[in-house]
Image (spheres, helix red, strand yellow):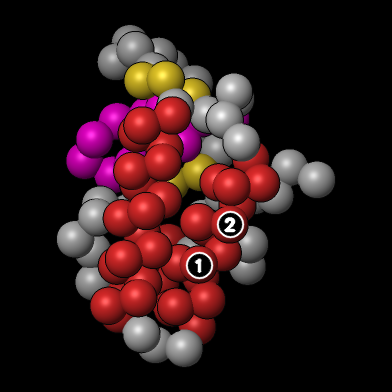
Amino acid sequence: MIIRIMGEGQFDVADVDHKLLQTYDNQVEDAVNVGNEEAARNALNSLHDYVVGHGKPVSDDFLGTSEAVVPFVDATLEEITELLTGEGFIPDPA
């Protein structure tokens, strides 16, 4: 799976712990659902750090699409909400 982090590029997360990745994604969605911007940003930072720290950067000349888009880490609650789907940012592979 390829995840795009806005303003930073794309990361291949095929070899990461998808359960943990989904946990971070769910934390963002839960915080957004209750309107807690601070918790949403903290969870978004955790998701970002996990993707960047464990995913493999995708070459700039890669022409494929991203299966998920994650906002930049200092996004507002409104900006985060705009990118959420009914499954968070990252579709559950199960």
Q: Nearer the viewer, residue 59 or 56?
A: 56
The answer to whether 26 is drawn above or below residue 39 in the figure is above
Within 10 Å of disc 2 (Cα), the crowding (few <14, some 14-19, many 20+) is: few
The residue labelled by disc 1 is 27
Q: CA distance from mark 1 to mark 2?
A: 6 Å
Report helix, strand or loop for mark 1. helix
- Total numbered circles: 2
Report the span colored magenta: 1-11
**Is 68 within the magenta?**
no
Q: Nearer the viewer, residue 10 or 40?
A: 40
Q: Residue 92, which numbered label?
A: none
Q: Is residue 83 left or right of residue 87?
A: left
Q: Is residue 38 left or right of residue 32?
A: left
Residue drawn at x 24%, y 35% as measured from the top left:
8
- Position of residue 86 measured from the top left corner of the image (x, y, whole percent): 63, 68
Q: Is residue 86 left or right of residue 71?
A: right
**Is 9 within the magenta?**
yes
Q: In terms of secondary structure, what is the magenta stretch mainly?
A: strand
Can residue 4 be seen here? no
- Position of residue 45 measured from the top left corner of the image (x, y, whole percent): 31, 55
- Farthest-out residue, right: 94
Report helix, strand or loop for mark 2. helix
Instruction: Report the amino acid beneath label 2.
Output: Thr
Can residue 53 be seen here? yes
Mark 1 touches mark 2? (CB < 8 Å): yes
The residue labelled by disc 2 is 23
Quadrant containing the C terminus is top right
The answer to whether 32 is drawn above or below residue 93 in the figure is below
Instruction: Report the amino acid beneath label 1.
Output: Gln
Q: Is residue 77 left or right of residue 25?
A: left
Quadrant containing the N terminus is top right
